[in-house]
Amino acid sequence: MTLHLYLRDQDIVTVIADPQESPFWPARSQEHRYLTRSEVLQQPGGKEWAIERRLEFEQQHRPTHEFLNESAGASPATSDVVICAVCGRTHDKAESELYFQMPEEVYALSEEERDRRSQRNSDLCVLDEKRFYVRGLLPLPVAGRAKPYCIGVWALVSPQTFTRINELWTDPAQAGEPRLPGVLSNQIPFHAETTGLGLEIELTGPKTRPNFFLKPIEHSLFLEQSHGIDEHRALEYSDRSARESPSDSGHGSEKD
């Protein structure tokens, strides 16, 4: 089957050649004809099939991609839709970014132990009154994006650093504070051991979570943060988040 799509009077027109091979064509009919939109959508799986064909065409025909985004009030540079150059899939940038609800050490506890031994909210955590954690963002530059892909992670910090972060929590001038030391406390997928990697904490503002920057080390995660990732890698992280991460009202860059 060959699917022909083209623009006519600002509408997308679809023509199916070799219609007998289409899943929506009666098997006994060999006569060439046009399928109406309603005919396609009424078939089982018709809507999904039509969306896939439309996205394939948009992916392969850049002028149409730009036209559709401009018609929707978005320029190609600011489009929320991205096309992965590796797998060819079209995705929404609004897909969840990978994040962790709690530090690895706390997550490993049973729910009963967790409640008994830790005090925590969406941004801060204390375990056994002697291990202190802060939640932040690990930014990874993405080729073709203005903003980085941010993995939501936790850092183990000293009591002194934890106290200092609390002192500056609502301070509008906290971004001027020198970076603070910490240790990554989550295992990031697709990498060798990441828990225990040294990092620096950059406070950003009273309403936003701090940024975490790994200290120089021969490690694949450090290379991704220092040199950036491609769209395919960002989508891999998002797909991992969609399949494995539980919902969390504290997800994102803003503090609760």
Image (cartoon, rainbow, N blue to C red):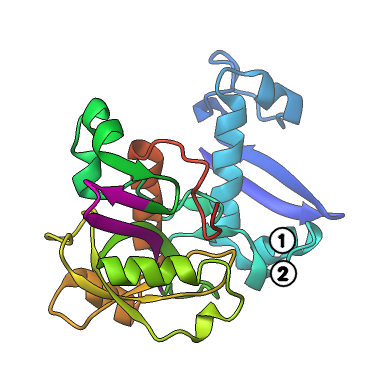
Callout 2 amino acid:
Ser
Earlier in the chain: of badge 1 and badge 2, it is 1
Identify the disc placed on residue 75: 2
Residue 199's x, y, as percent?
26, 74
Mark 1, secondary structure of its residue: helix
Q: Can residue 98 be seen in this view?
A: no
At 44% across and 54% down in the image, what residue appears?
123
Identify the disc placed on residue 215: none
Disc 1 and disc 2 in contact, CB within 8 angstroms:
yes
Callout 1 amino acid:
Asn
Q: Mark 1 highlights which residue?
A: 69
- Residue 51 magenta-highlighted: no
The magenta stretch spans which residues?
125-140
Between 7 and 178, the residue placed more toward the observer is: 178
Residue ranking furthest to the top: 28
Q: Residues within 10 Å of mark 2 (few under 14, many from 20)?
A: some
At 69% across and 66% down in the image, what residue appears?
66
